[in-house]
Image (spheres, rainbow, N blue to C red):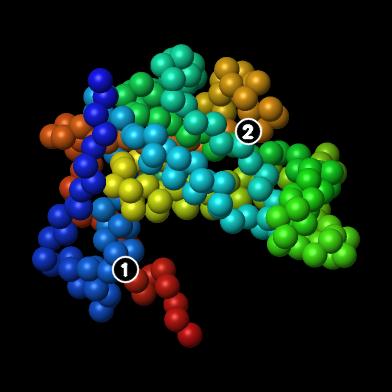
Amino acid sequence: MMSAVPRYTRFVPPQQQLIEGIKVSHQIIQDLNSRYTAKKYDESKRISQDDMAVIKEAIRLSASSINSQPWKFIVIESDEAKQRFHDTFANMHQFNQPHAKAASHTILLAYDPNFTKEKFAKRVDAEVASGHLPADMYDMFMGAYAFAEANTDEHGYNGSWTKAQVYIALGNLLHTLARLGIDSSPMEGVDPSLLGEIFKDELDGHVCEVALAIGYHKDGEDYNHGLPKARLPMDDVVTTL
Ligand SMILES: Cc1cc2nc3c(=O)[nH]c(=O)nc-3n(C[C@H](O)[C@H](O)[C@H](O)COP(=O)(O)O)c2cc1C
């Protein structure tokens, strides 16, 4: 029987407790300091279905340009699906392969390489049905497809734009998981080609180039756990005018 796991707060050394005047005691900063990329998972610990429901809803609520939602998220939960995911590491990136079975779940994040105007219309339908957009503004909202068009080549490919939207969902997920006290490992070290073959039906034309293993790290065996954050100084990355 798999056990649900109590939430934990990661220890922050005293010298890190004030960074550039920011109180790391703020909940947001604590969450972002406590999350890290797990390198070894505890196979005996599984995420509760209540937390999985929060995670799936957080994915669904992710923002995207023009509310395009040009994505598909495949949650790998069953042993059968884990075996299929494990098989996709046959040719490359085997360093990530152990997560396929040891992590509680893995989420495949996939983008639509051909996000058409017809697909956008389905989103605009939802805009109206939800009450967010007045029906008489339908055509005006359809005009926003120009943002997609500006990123579409002569073959209808707009994958670099739709992939950017998928990464917003990834960032949203990382923060959500930190809040839930669940460990995670983003993985660009996946094989889009084998994923495309082995999860062809589920991907339904979408392309997966990044996945997220989620679960609980193995105590004492994850070399990356408990280390300080390694980030560039504030002045190198943020300019306030
Ligand atoms: C888009 C993305 C892809 C990544 N791919 C991998 C990967 O394939 N394998 C891995 O072990 N870590 C991967 N990482 C983890 C990064 O190396 C890690 O996020 C970075 O070093 C910062 O460390 P932290 O996540 O522990 O804060 C990836 C991270 C991101 C955001």
Q: Is residue 203 visible?
A: yes
Closer to the N terminus: mark 2 or mark 1?
A: 2
Q: Residue at coordinates 62% horizontally, 45% vertically from top-left?
A: 163
| In the image, residue 38 above or below residue 167 | above
Is 4 left or right of 81, judged from the image as shown? left
Q: Is the residue at mark 2 in contact range of ligand 1, meaning its CB lies under 8 Å from it? A: no
The amino acid on which the numbered mark 2 sits, given as a three-letter code, is Val
Instruction: From the top left corner, tell me how far across and down residue 148 is, in percent.
Output: 76, 53
Q: Quadrant of residue 111?
A: top right
Quadrant showing the N terminus: top left
Kindly report which numbered mark, 2 or 1, lies closer to the viewer in this rendering.
2
Instruction: From the top left corner, tell me how far across and down residue 75 is, in percent.
Output: 49, 31
Q: CA distance from mark 2 to mark 1?
A: 35 Å
Is 52 left or right of 61, judged from the image as shown? left
Residue of label 1: 233
Instruction: From the top left corner, tell me how far across and down residue 180 is, in percent.
Output: 33, 48
Q: Residue at coordinates 84% horizontally, 44% vertically from top-left?
A: 118
Tally of numbered tags: 2
Is 89 left or right of 110, judged from the image as shown? left
Which residue is most to the bottom?
A: 241
Instruction: From the top left corner, tell me how far across and down residue 117 is, in percent.
Output: 83, 47
Q: Within 10 angstroms of label 1, few (less than 14), some, or many (20 or more) residues? A: few
Q: Secondary structure at mark 2?
A: strand
* Towards the viewer: 185 or 123: 123
Residue of label 2: 207
Q: Is residue 164 visible?
A: no
Q: Residue at coordinates 22% horizontally, 68% vertically from top-left?
A: 25
